[in-house]
Amino acid sequence: MLENKLKNYLLLHFIVFIWGFTAILGALITIDAIPLVWYRMLLAVLFIVLYFVWKRKSFKTDKKSLLKFFITGVIIALHWIFFFKAIKVSNVSVALVTMSTGAFFTAFIEPLFFKRKLKFIEIFLGLIVILGLYIIFNFESQYKLGIIYALIASFLGALFAVLNGLFVKMYEASSISLYQLFFGVVFITVYLFFTNGFSVSFFKVSLSDWWYLLLLSSICTAYAFIASVKIMKFLSPYTVMLTINLEPVYAIILALLIFKEKEQMSSSFYFGASIVLFVVLLNGILKNKGALKSRFLKNNPRKK
């Protein structure tokens, strides 16, 4: 059991690294956030459908489930739109560090759905993340709009993670991913239709953007989406969200290597970002300590 949990935790870190690369692709792709997410979700749906056909998996699901998947599909679509908007109006580093507030939002949202009490340590760690964000906001005020977009994306991401934490107990990860992404595409399509968003320029995508979109939709979306949902069978939403806080660390390193001067920030930014990393490491230590203590008490009931 412990070995299986460790395996899934390492897989989660790999997925978080992929998500860090997602931000890089978002900066490299030249089209706007809404068409970017539309293409991403549409292509990802096609890849997952091919996976279903290859594995001979059934597409059937009940109507009640479809409603749940529609709601969460809209949430994930909006999450990605605000996420990529944040990158477009600021940069990769600012957007991803701000996204780390997801752990703070999850600390309040998760107890409502999992019917448990608020944990002081989760709120405390979330507040430390907010402190790191405050330091960044104070010294990088030119990125205010990007920070606001990223905060909205962070809240939606936390809500989505908690809801999927419930769904994985009832449905297969691949089915959840397929229908959520499908309904996300439907939602954006309806929005674009009524706002006259579909135009000739909408479908004019450069060759380099197509390559980036294919990579984004296959590895960074279809694979990572299914794998991340499956992992939630073994890890709590809060642990998942806090581990996702490592995404800015991976992405900032990649961004500095790829974009160089454009991603170089002030020392205050890196101080604030280091606070976020500290929270992730502290959470890992506390979670492992708690798990070891529980295991010890279970094996030695007289020690309680």
Image (spheres, rainbow, N blue to C red):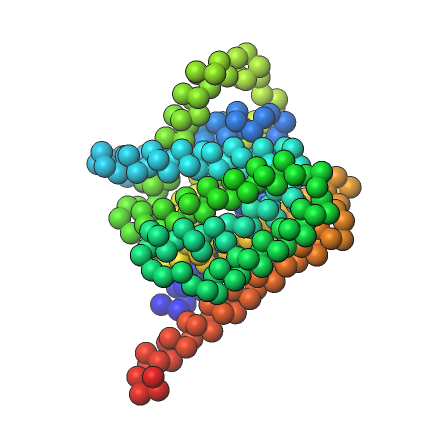
Q: Residue at x 65, y 44 (%)?
A: 94
Residue 69 x %, y % = 33, 37
Q: Nearer the viewer, residue 93 or 101?
A: 101
Q: Residue furthest bottom?
A: 302
Q: Nearer the viewer, residue 267 or 201?
A: 267
Instruction: Give the quadrant of the N terminus.
Output: bottom left
Instruction: Give the quadrant of the C terminus.
Output: bottom left
Q: Is residue 217 visible?
A: no
In the picture shown, does residue 56 fall above or below 5?
Answer: above
Q: Quadrant of residue 176?
A: top left
Q: Quadrant of residue 51?
A: top left
Q: Is residue 22 left or right of residue 229?
A: right
Q: Residue at x 47, y 50 (%)?
A: 105
Q: Is residue 238 visible?
A: yes
Q: Nearer the viewer, residue 57 or 252?
A: 252
Residue 81 x %, y % = 52, 32
In the picture shown, does residue 211 fall above or below 3?
Answer: above
Q: Residue at x 52, y 27 (%)?
A: 34
Residue 298 x %, y % = 32, 78
Q: Residue at x 50, y 53 (%)?
A: 104
Numbered marks: total = 0
Residue 129 x %, y % = 58, 56
